[in-house]
Amino acid sequence: MQVRADRVSLEGHHGTLLPPTSLTVGEGDLAIVHGEPGVGVTAFGLALAGRLKPTTGTVHAEGAEGDLPGLVAVVDAPGVSEPDDALSLRVVVGEELALAHRPAGKEDVTRWLAEHNAAPFAGTRFENLVPALRTRLLTELAAERKGVRVLVLDTPDRHTSDVGSWAGLAREQAERGLAVVVLTATTPLSALPFTPARIGSTEQPAPQHLSPEPEPTEELPESADGDPA
């Protein structure tokens, strides 16, 4: 399964939100996309997820059933999918589980937090979570939604200068077979773990492929009568 964005652009009321940008990412791939701080980076993520209709260009999924909004989850997009800072972690997890049409009662939330090593923070206001924990939990909640094959992490670098805290997480999800796109805006290019794709470019470096390829099935030798030996 691949998601292809071909020369996607977006125009707003006051000018260009997103200049023409292309990207192709498949299952097991990790792509980092870098742009200037502002709405353009998030706009590209929302276009990838089918939540914004491009002014020009196209976005489509190949080799997968379902529409883009069901296949692509945008994680922690400013003003779009980021949780309310005043809510407790317990409430945020409950809302995310309900959004995913999963059991979201008090016991379900408590169980999920315990399974993800976050039970001690259940009552913590979301704004007070350390950035690494915030990004990890939101990413894991999105990855567990039924049908999601692509994760778009929206500018985790706006919360921290620790690149490793989100880069390692993104690699883990790609190694599990998901396609992962990390949008960045404030991290210097030299600090990124590999050459990123760029907002405003239609010629991009290939993403890193991290999911191991399935091993070929070994065929058993046939006996004289044609049955497997």
Image: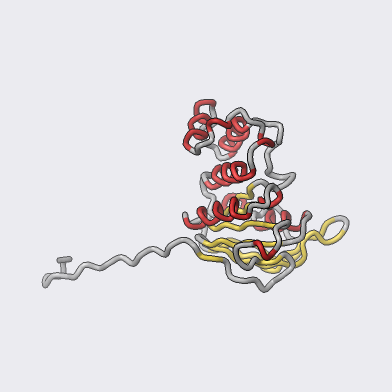
The answer to which image quadrant residue 203 occupies is bottom right
Front in this rendered view, residue 34 or 219: 34
Q: Residue at x 54, y 37 (%)?
A: 101
Is 18 located above or below residue 81 in the figure? below
Q: Is residue 66 visible?
A: no
Residue 191: tell me if it is visible.
yes
119 with respect to 134 (left or right) = left
Q: Quadrant of the C terminus?
A: bottom left
Q: Total of numbered circles in the picture? A: 0
Residue 190's quadrant in the figure?
bottom right
Percent from the top left, x then y, of residue 81?
68, 44
Q: Residue at x 58, y 70 (%)?
A: 206
Q: Picture coordinates of residue 48 (x, y %)?
A: 65, 58
Q: In this rendering, would 31 be left or right of 229?
A: right
Give the quadrant of residue 9.
Answer: bottom right
- For this rendering, which residue is in front, 190 or 14? 190
